[in-house]
């Protein structure tokens, strides 16, 4: 019973955090963009403009909802819902921190520790594209349709390379469970000879895999340089051209949640998740609950850094063209990720003999 | 390729070096640039609070000048209205009556002087056309408003207030005639 | 190597076309010829193919309207440029306002396409052989040719001016 | 934020049913700080609008930097530049596609009144086809003036009652433009 | 047999997608409408409709005295209005047979080259923005702002400048203005390099642009291309060199050339033209001669205000000029300058009246934009948008 309460509480907290992060990521995006462009950014709504997301949200709620006459109404409403739900669901298998302890019972800071966590992430993420697809198709607008088609083909091509790059990580940890992958990145000997504490991260073993995974994550989140499904200058708004009011808000929100979650997943896979130097020492001296919060903080900070990184990239580089994107996905990233798998396998067998 | 002069040179190089082919170096360089800009002082002026200084010759809202004794300079000759490409100026002239010498400098004066600020393109031709030192454009901007009628500026808004003289000496042109 | 100047061009043209060149003069140094409108195609082709001249750049096409010249009310003015020799020539063709028509230059210059459409739009000059002669700048529904001198500039929808001042 | 002075509500939002309640005020405040523009930039004023978006003036400070080119998502239609008679129906179409509440700013002499183009082909002010909330003079207006226009519009938005869009006056206003 | 069937199928494909791009599409930057017939994302056929901001410049010009037409030329190519202004003044001066002093020429060159920089900055930063890199746009717009400051210091306006007068300049450069110009020359190149580094050799950007919307030199000439677009195709036609006006023969500069006439060529050519313009401005600022800033044309150049107040003769000239009653020779004149987008020509017919009898603008955008359907045929939607922004089609100039 207690575990149920804990899990429900965790789900609620994660839900709120995701939403809060997404809301403030919109603000962060605007501020980051502004600073990179020598501007100030929103600063009128509240001190430093921190109420900006609230203003935006309120406005969107109060805006008139337009459902085009020519659209498929059910699907039109379903699209943003699917997108939002899937983006929120992904966070379920992420180990957010070390275990908490209440009354001598340990509670893992993870909604569901399923032993195929990674596969679950993949499954849910690939469902997300249905949200875009359905929304774009139901709008009955050519720009939206083009955006939807671009989105789905992009997702399909990049998921492959993403999966291949992950296989290398799975080979190293020998498990599909995210918890195992994270714990294996704690203490140990880096490259087999440098003793480290909480820094035995996969990034040091899998730099190429990381880059491939990162690029694919960009593509999965529809962020520049892969924001073809919604690029302003070509498709106006892409798949969400016809959406107004909060349905548009859901799309925009979900995009930022996706960014946050992929930041968290990247951290878990390559940057040690909640591990940080000195974690094992602290857990011996401090209350486990405080340690759990600290480790959660570490993961959170890493995820936020990646959100920033996403924005940084967005405001720096141009986007690809559709055919170049396909070429990059199939002709460069996929072979590279296969090579990565082969290399990893070779090295593993060579050294672990 | 057709060569017409001897002063031309092909400047485009479409061959990518290996480093350029790698994508990442150029991206990293770009990211470094944008990152450095994060710590630069923003170029922004917070406009309604901090106002940018305009050039002294800026062509903003018009003013109908008075002379040192506070008399209106305008003599309603109509040259400004003729010179206006937007035909935004309407003048009604009237004869100066006895006892009004302290109000108007010339024998004729503009009983009605209206500029339609929405039509006006602030080209400054009226200022140039004025032979009587009467109309000037100033470095003040015309504020936006809610109705079209509120942009018809009559003499009440245009004639310079005695307690708020506008210095236009910097606008006057200097001619170096040898 | 021949000296390419206005005189040379004029002689070449007169040798070839003779009487069909009605008039020629050089305002501000630019050779201008008035041409029989039926020979515009031939002249443009001649200038284009001429070994020395190579007038292969059509700078400009525009119309003009002289309502008081009877029988020659509408005109088309061509500016042709030889980039190699850096020489220009202006060709004018006039035609009566009833059923004005002239051969299109699109057979030689792709750039003539829109310029002729514009001229048609403004003056109603019919370019024979033009691939797509319809209005370009104005709305298709327009039923007059606005640049002809008899049509006013304003459409009378402006409400905020008083025309009684200063002879406007 | 603090030193924005309270002004009299502008003339076109006064009248019965227009007095803002406190809920209205909060929502008005939110809306005013999140005016997403749809730049309908046709000519010179469009370039000045770009300058307004640029670093030196930064429209983002007013929460308005998220340009939405899709009319469904925009709150304020910024008409910048000459609207010819050929363009008029397009402009009206865009206005119709926008979701309520929607506002219109006419930027520059051409959009507001026709400017120097008193000709057969130019619409003498966009208020001939759609209702306009704020006029910005100038040809083209300085970025300061465009920001002024946005600030003036924010005043309208802040003080607008939520019921205004259902009121008869508003319907009559739209009706006069042939919008049901 | 099977092959021919497949071919047949391809050629008889009838279900094309029709996509209406514009007139308010964001990438069209205003008012161009292109109806694209598309096969997936490949453009098969394009129909361009223009005229959405037709403002009847030529008709207005027939109703306005000469000095008021400057305000019209401002609004032709509003990205580089000073060039248009100067071109118009030079046309009238050519008609009147006025010789301008060297100082006027140099001042004009400085202003025109600044305008060219401003124009090319807009174009290139918009190419960047259309590829998705918005930041470069904000960087160079700060410098465009500085050019505006200079214009403001010279004439009092930022964009539609109404700069210069028939027979000279409106006023001399003020010391503050000179300082701003020198500051610009000193600081701008560094920041411009930054912009260049962001885009020019970035593989993503290069791949987006190379081979996009190409046009061969022959086709470009046939389509009447001029300016950077023609030079990108590899023809070094530049009015400043071929028919120097306003003392351009005094300056040493190079004509940058492209090879294929694709978007990348156009981008790089413009980048280099900015650098060349800087060179010209530097030379002009260093060698600017002393002297009057107006020519001796009492019939057109307004006398000093003090003279007007006190001197009857000056007052009469003043009235004559403003009323537009100065005598003009009868005749016709064609003058062209190198505008932001190419040869900007003015063909004026004067009948001796107060207004031109006929004034035709040779608008480079209008003429070169016709090639657009041909240039984007067979390319993708994204390419079409880049091609359009790289041609720098300015609506005001296109529709007149």
Image: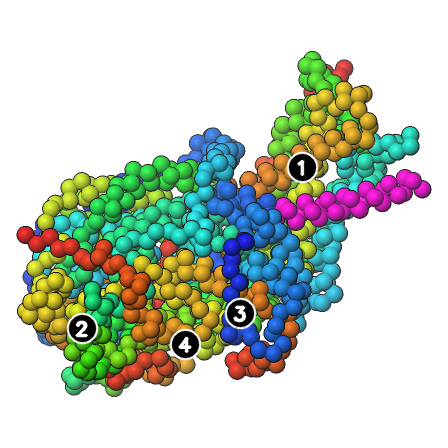
Task: Classify B13 as above or below B162.
Answer: above
Q: Which mark is residue B149?
A: 4
Horizontal side of C60 relative to A149 (left or right) equals left
Residue A138 visible in rendering: no
Is A16 part of what is drawn in magenta? yes
Task: Classify B32 as above or below B178.
Answer: above
The residue where tag 3 is placed is D9
Q: Which residues are magenta?
A: A1-26
Is B45 part of what is drawn in magenta? no
Instruction: Give the spatial CA distance, label 3 vs label 2.
Output: 41 Å
Q: Nearer the viewer, mark 3 or mark 1?
A: 3
Question: Circle 1 marks a residue in which chain?
Answer: A
Question: Circle 4 marks a residue in which chain?
Answer: B
Q: Main secondary structure of the magenta part?
A: helix
Horizontal side of D145 relative to C14 (left or right) equals right
Q: Which mark is residue B105?
A: 2
Residue B53: x %, y % from top left: 34, 51
Q: Residues within 10 Å of mark 4 (few under 14, many from 20)?
A: few
Callout 4 secondary element? helix
Q: Residues within 10 Å of mark 1 (few under 14, many from 20)?
A: many
Residue E225: x %, y % from top left: 30, 56
Snapshot quadrant of residue A114:
top right
Q: How many marks?
A: 4
Chosen colour scheme: rainbow
Residue E109: x %, y % from top left: 20, 50
Instruction: Give the spatial CA distance, label 3 vs label 1.
Output: 46 Å
Callout 2 secondary element? loop
Q: Nearer the viewer, mark 4 or mark 1?
A: 4
The residue where tag 1 is placed is A303
Instruction: Give the spatial CA distance, label 4 vs label 1.
Output: 56 Å
């Amino acid at each position: 019973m207690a575990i149920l309460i804990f899990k429900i509480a965790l789900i609620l907290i994660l839900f709120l955090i995701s939403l809060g992060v997404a809301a403030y990521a919109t603000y962060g995006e605007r501020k980051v963009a502004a600073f990179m462009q020598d501007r100030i950014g929103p600063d009128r709504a509240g001190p430093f403009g921190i109420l900006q997301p609230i203003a935006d949200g309120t406005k969107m709620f109060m805006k008139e909802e337009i459902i085009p006459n020519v659209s498929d109404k059910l699907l039109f409403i379903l699209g943003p819902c699917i997108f939002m739900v899937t983006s929120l669901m992904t966070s379920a298998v992420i180990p957010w921190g070390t275990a908490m302890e209440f009354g001598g019972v340990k509670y893992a800071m993870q909604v569901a520790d399923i032993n195929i966590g990674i596969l679950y992430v993949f499954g849910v993420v690939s469902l997300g594209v249905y949200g875009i697809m359905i929304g774009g198709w139901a709008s009955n607008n050519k720009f939206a349709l083009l955006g939807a088609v671009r989105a789905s083909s992009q997702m399909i091509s990049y998921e492959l390379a993403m999966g291949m790059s992950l296989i290398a990580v799975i080979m190293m940890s020998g498990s599909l469970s995210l918890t195992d992958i994270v714990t294996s990145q704690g203490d140990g000997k880096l490259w087999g000879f440098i003793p480290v504490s909480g820094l035995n991260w996969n990034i040091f073993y899998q730099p190429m895999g990381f880059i491939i995974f990162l690029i694919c994550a960009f593509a999965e989140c529809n962020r520049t340089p892969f924001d073809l499904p919604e690029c302003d200058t070509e498709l106006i708004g892409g798949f969400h051209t016809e959406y107004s009011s909060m349905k548009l808000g859901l799309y925009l929100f979900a995009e930022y949640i996706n960014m946050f979650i992929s930041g968290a997943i990247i951290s878990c896979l390559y940057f040690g998740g909640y591990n940080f130097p000195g974690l094992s020492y602290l857990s011996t001296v401090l209350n486990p609950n405080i340690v759990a919060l600290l480790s959660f903080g570490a993961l959170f900070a890493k995820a936020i850094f990646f959100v920033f990184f996403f924005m940084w990239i967005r405001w720096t580089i141009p986007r690809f063209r559709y055919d170049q994107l396909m070429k990059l996905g199939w002709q460069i990233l996929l072979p590279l990720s296969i090579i990565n798998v082969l290399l990893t396998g070779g090295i593993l067998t060579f050294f672990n003999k | 390729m057709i060569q017409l002069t001897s002063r031309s040179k092909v400047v485009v190089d479409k061959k990518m070096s290996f480093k350029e082919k790698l994508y990442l170096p150029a991206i990293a360089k770009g990211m470094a640039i944008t990152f450095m800009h994060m710590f630069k002082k923003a170029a922004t002026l917070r406009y309604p609070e901090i106002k940018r200084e305009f050039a002294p010759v800026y062509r903003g809202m018009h003013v109908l000048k008075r002379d040192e004794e506070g008399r209106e300079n305008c003599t309603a000759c109509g040259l400004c209205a003729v010179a206006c490409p937007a035909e935004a100026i309407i003048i009604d002239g009237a004869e100066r009556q006895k006892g009004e010498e302290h109000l108007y400098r010339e024998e004729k004066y503009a009983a009605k002087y209206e500029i339609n600020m929405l039509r006006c393109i602030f080209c400054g031709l009226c200022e140039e056309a004025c032979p009587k030192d009467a109309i000037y454009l100033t470095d003040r901007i015309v504020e936006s408003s809610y109705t079209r009628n509120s942009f018809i500026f009559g003499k009440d808004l245009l004639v310079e207030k005695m307690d708020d003289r506008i210095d236009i000496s910097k606008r006057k042109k200097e001619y170096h005639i040898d | 190597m021949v000296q390419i100047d206005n005189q040379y061009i004029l002689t070449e043209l007169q040798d070839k076309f003779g009487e069909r060149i009605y008039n020629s003069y050089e305002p501000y140094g630019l050779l201008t010829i008035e041409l029989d409108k039926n020979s515009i195609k031939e002249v443009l082709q001649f200038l284009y193919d001429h070994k020395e001249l190579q007038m292969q750049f059509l700078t400009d096409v525009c119309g003009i309207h002289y309502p008081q010249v009877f029988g020659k009310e509408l005109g088309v003015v061509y500016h042709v440029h030889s980039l190699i020799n850096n020489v220009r020539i202006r060709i004018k063709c006039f035609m009566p306002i009833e059923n004005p028509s002239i051969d299109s230059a699109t057979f030689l210059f792709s750039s003539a396409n829109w310029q002729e459409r514009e001229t048609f739009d403004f003056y109603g000059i019919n370019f024979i052989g033009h691939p797509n002669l319809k209005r370009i700048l104005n709305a298709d529904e327009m039923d007059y040719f606005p640049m002809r001198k008899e049509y006013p500039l304003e459409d009378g929808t402006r409400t905020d001016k008083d025309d009684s001042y200063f002879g406007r | 934020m603090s030193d924005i002075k309270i002004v009299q509500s502008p003339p076109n939002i006064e009248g019965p049913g227009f007095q803002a309640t406190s809920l209205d005020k909060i929502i008005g405040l939110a809306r005013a700080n999140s005016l997403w523009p749809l730049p309908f930039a046709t000519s010179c004023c469009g370039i000045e609008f770009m300058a307004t978006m640029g670093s030196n003036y930064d429209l983002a400070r007013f929460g308005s930097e998220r340009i939405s080119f899709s009319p469904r998502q925009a709150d304020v239609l910024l008409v910048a530049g000459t609207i010819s008679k050929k363009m008029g129906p397009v402009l009206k179409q865009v206005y119709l596609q926008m979701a309520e509440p929607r506002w219109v700013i006419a930027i520059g002499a051409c959009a507001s009144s026709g400017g120097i183009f008193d000709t057969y082909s130019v619409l003498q002010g966009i208020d001939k086809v759609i209702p306009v909330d704020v006029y910005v003079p100038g040809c083209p207006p300085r970025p300061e003036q465009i920001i002024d226009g946005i600030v003036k519009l924010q005043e309208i938005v802040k003080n607008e009652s939520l019921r205004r869009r259902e009121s008869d006056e508003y319907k009559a206003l739209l009706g006069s433009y042939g919008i049901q | 047999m099977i092959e021919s069937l497949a071919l047949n199928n391809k050629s008889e494909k009838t279900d094309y997608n029709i996509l209406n791009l514009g007139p308010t599409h964001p990438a069209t930057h205003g008012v161009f409408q292109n109806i694209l017939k598309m096969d997936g994302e490949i453009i098969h056929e394009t129909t361009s409709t223009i005229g959405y901001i037709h403002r009847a410049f030529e008709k207005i010009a027939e109703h306005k005295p000469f000095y008021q037409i400057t305000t019209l030329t401002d609004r032709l190519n509003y990205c580089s209005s000073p060039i248009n202004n100067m071109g118009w003044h030079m046309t009238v001066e050519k008609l009147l047979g006025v010789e301008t002093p060297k100082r006027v020429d140099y001042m004009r060159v400085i202003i025109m080259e600044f305008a060219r920089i401003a124009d090319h900055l807009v174009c290139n930063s918009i190419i960047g923005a259309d590829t998705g890199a918005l930041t470069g746009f904000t960087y160079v717009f700060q410098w465009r702002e500085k050019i505006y400051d200079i214009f403001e210091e010279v004439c009092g306006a930022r964009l539609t400048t109404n700069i210069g007068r028939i027979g000279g300049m409106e006023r001399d450069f003020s010391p503050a203005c000179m300082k701003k110009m020198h500051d610009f020359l000193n600081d701008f190149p560094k920041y411009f390099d930054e912009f260049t580094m962001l885009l020019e050799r970035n593989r993503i950007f290069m791949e987006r642009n190379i081979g996009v919307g190409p046009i061969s030199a022959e086709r470009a000439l046939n389509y009447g291309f001029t300016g950077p677009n023609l030079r990108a195709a590899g023809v070094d036609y530049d009015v400043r060199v071929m028919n120097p006006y306003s003392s351009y023969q005094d300056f040493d500069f190079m004509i940058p050339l492209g090879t294929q006439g694709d978007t990348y060529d156009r981008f790089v050519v413009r980048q280099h033209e900015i650098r060349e313009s800087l060179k010209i401005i530097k030379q002009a600022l260093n060698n600017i001669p002393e002297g009057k800033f107006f020519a001796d044309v009492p019939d057109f150049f307004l006398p000093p205000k003090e003279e007007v107040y006190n001197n009857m003769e000056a007052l009469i000239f003043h009235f004559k000029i403003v009323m537009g009653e100065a005598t003009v020779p009868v005749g016709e004149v064609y003058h062209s300058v190198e505008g932001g987008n190419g040869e900007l020509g003015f063909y004026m017919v004067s009948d001796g009246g107060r207004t031109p009898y006929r004034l035709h603008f040779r608008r480079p955008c209008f003429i070169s934009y016709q090639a657009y359907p041909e240039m984007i045929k067979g390319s993708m939607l994204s390419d079409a948008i880049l091609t359009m922004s790289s041609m720098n089609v300015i609506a005001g100039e296109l529709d007149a």
